[in-house]
Amino acid sequence: MTRISADAAGIERAARVIREGGVVAIPTDTLYGLAADPFNADAVARIVDGKERPAERALPLIAADIDQVVARLGALPAMAARLAARFWPGPLTLVISAPAALAPAVSGATGRVGVRVPAHDVARALCRACNSPLTATSANISGAAASASPDEVARTIGSRIDLLLDAGPTPGGAPSTVVDVTGAEPRLLRAGAVAWSEVIACVDRA
């Protein structure tokens, strides 16, 4: 594993590694995550194997902005678009229908995928440099504690990744709230930083 600073040159180098099928540990607005091209089945398999993660568990994605989500994953349903406009960038993951081009392991064979736009400049810049949403599952062995420390990421999973984009400790805090928006009504899949009452209020205002 190579460890580099999360400056403009580092972001471009990380993007190059990802475009070539590599796996990069990156900072987000909560913890460190593992970024790879979600349309590259071999790269996704490296994350699943490296984390020793059950294959049926889907991998969350992050994106640079709403436009990138629409361009690469497809048009958002009206309810999802309202929630995205209200809470992105931020800790709300929207579960939408997965496009056929996405590596099957990303959706865990569910046909759905979770995506959000993080409130972290480096994470969004990397998605922009890659011209694609990226995986953002936590940078740890499955079942172990996720980490906000790049030193801990290097110690525990460094041998299983290609690059660590080091921006110092991340904020930590509550995980993103996960909401399924594939049906007629929103469905809470995981409580998190955005209160469910705020989600419902946003939907009800439409």
Image: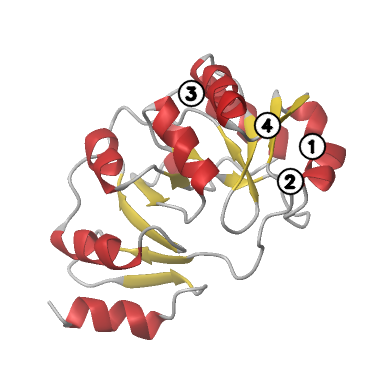
Q: Of the residues shown, which amino acid type is indicated by label 1?
A: Ile
Residue at 57 percent of width and 65 percent of height: 175
Residue found farthest to the top: 20
Q: Amino acid at mark 2?
A: Asn
What is the C-alpha distance between the residues marked 1 and 4? 12 Å
Judged left or right of residue 104, residue 180 is left
Mark 4 Cα shell of 10 Å, populated few (<14), some (14-19), many (≥20) = some
User: Secondary structure beneath disc 1?
Assistant: helix
Between disc 2 and disc 3, the foreground one is 2
Q: Residues within 10 Å of mark 1 (few under 14, many from 20)?
A: some
Percent position of residue 66, x then y: 28, 48
Can you identify the residue that label 2 sits on? Answer: 140
Q: Which residue is mark 3?
A: 41
Quadrant occupied by the N terminus: top right
Q: CA distance from mark 2 to mark 4?
A: 12 Å
Tell me if residue 152 comes above or below residue 100 in the rendering.
below
Q: Which label number is shown at residue 157?
A: 1
Image marks 1 and 2: residues in contact by CB distance under 8 Å: yes
Judge by depth and name the residue closer to the eye, 146 or 12: 12
